[in-house]
Image (cartoon, grey):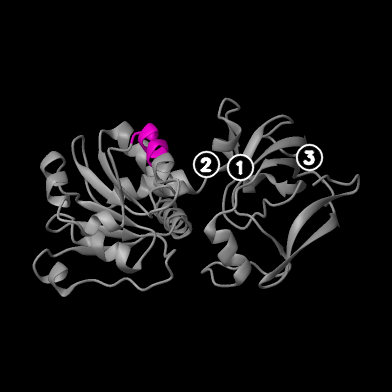
Amino acid sequence: MSASHNGCTILWEGQHPNPLLKDLERAELGHSGVHVKMLAAPINPADINMIQGTYALLPDLPAVGGNEGVGQVVEVGSHVTSLKPGDWVVPADAELGTWRTDAVFSEETLVKLPRDIPLLCAATLSVNPCTAYRMLTDFETLGPGDSIIQNAANSGVGQAVIQIAAALGIKTINVIRDRPNLQEVVDRLMSLGAEHVLTEEMLRKPEMKDLFKKVPKPRLALNCVGGKSATEMLRHIQQKGTMVTYGGMAKQPLTVPVSAFIFKDVKLRGFWMTQWKKDQAQSKLKVISVGK
C-alpha cells in the first residue's frame, strides 16, 4: 500500500466486524506532533478480537487497527525534544493504530528504539516478548535448572518464552498441535533454545514419565489455548505449581480436575499485558503522591 501525497492508506474499523481500507488525510504536524512512517506491523490475535468486538479493550469507532509495530520518524514539531527524524519508534500503549502507511502521533505515545534491532524483531517487541518475560518472572521464582511447560509454543509469545527461558537457564517443555510440517516446526523451536517439543497427543502418553526422569516437573505452566490442552498440562506440573492463562485460542473453557486442587494445590492465575501496564502506572502514581 502506498501513501498519497496528502494522506495515508490505513485499515479502518468502520463497524465491527467489517474493516475497510480507506485513504484519509494526514493530521497537521503542529508544534508537538511526530510524523511517523510505519515500517512493519504484525497481526496478533488481540488485533482480530478488537475488530470482532470481543476484546476487553475496544477503541471508539471509527478507529485504526493494529496495536504493535515499528515506524521511522520523518519529521517532528518544534516542541518535540525526545525524538528526531530517522529514529525508530514503537507504540507506548495499545490502540495507537499501526496498520497504516504513516501518521502524525503525539510525542508521549511513542518509545524510541535502538536502530541495531532487526526490523521484524522491532515490530513485535512491545507485546509478545514483554508478556513472556513478565509471566516467567512474576508468578514463580525460577532459576537455572528449573523447568516450565507451555502450549502454543510456536506462537509469538511462545517463541519469546523459549528464548528468554534459555537465556535464564530454565528448561522448556513446549507443546504444539500435530501438523503436516511438524518436524519443521520442531526444528525451528529447538534452534531457538527449546529443551523439549511435544505434540498435545504426547502429553497423554505414559512416556511422559520417562521425560521427567531427564527434566524436573515444571513449577509453571503457560496456557494460551484452554480446553483439553490446558487440562493435560495441569496434570504434569509440580505440587503447588502455577498455571498462568493469557489466551484462549481453542475458544473452550478451562477445565480443572478436582484432584489438581485437592491433592496438588495448584494455583490458577491470569495475565494481560495491558492491565499490567495500568497497574504499574497506578503504583508509580501512588509513590509520587506520598512523596517517595
> Which residue is painted at 67% across and 50% down in the image?
98
Count neighbours of disc 3 (C-alpha within 10 A) and say few if under 14, some if 14 to 19, many if 20 or more: some
| Amino acid bearing label 1 | Val
Residue 282: where, in percent of width, then height?
A: 44, 58
Q: Which residues are magenta?
A: 186-193
Query: What's the magenta bit mostly, secondary-structure-wise?
Result: helix
| Left or right placement of residue 230 versus residue 154 in this view | left
Marked residue nearer the N-terminal end (2 or 3):
3
Indicate the secondary structure of the residue bearing disc 2.
Answer: loop
> Which residue is painted at 43% across and 48% down in the image?
157
Q: CA distance from mark 2 to mark 1?
A: 8 Å
Which corner quadrant of the image does residue 29 belong to? top right
Marked residue nearer the N-terminal end (2 or 1):
1
Count neighbours of disc 1 (C-alpha within 10 A) and say few if under 14, some if 14 to 19, many if 20 or more: many
Residue 13: where, in percent of width, then height?
A: 71, 66
Count neighbours of disc 2 (C-alpha within 10 A) and say few if under 14, some if 14 to 19, many if 20 or more: many
The answer to if 273 sits in the magenta stretch is no
Q: CA distance from mark 2 to mark 3?
A: 26 Å
Q: Which residue is mark 2?
A: 125
Q: Which residue is mark 3?
A: 77
Which corner quadrant of the image does residue 247 belong to? bottom left
Q: CA distance from mark 1 to mark 3?
A: 18 Å
Asked whether disc 2 touches disc 1, contact meaning CB atoms under 8 Å apart, the reply is: yes
> Which residue is painted at 12% across and 50% down in the image?
209
Q: Which residue is mark 1?
A: 90
**Which residue is nearer to you in this view: 245 or 137?**
245
The answer to if 192 sits in the magenta stretch is yes
Indicate the secondary structure of the residue bearing disc 1.
Answer: strand
> Which residue is painted at 53% across and 59% down in the image?
45
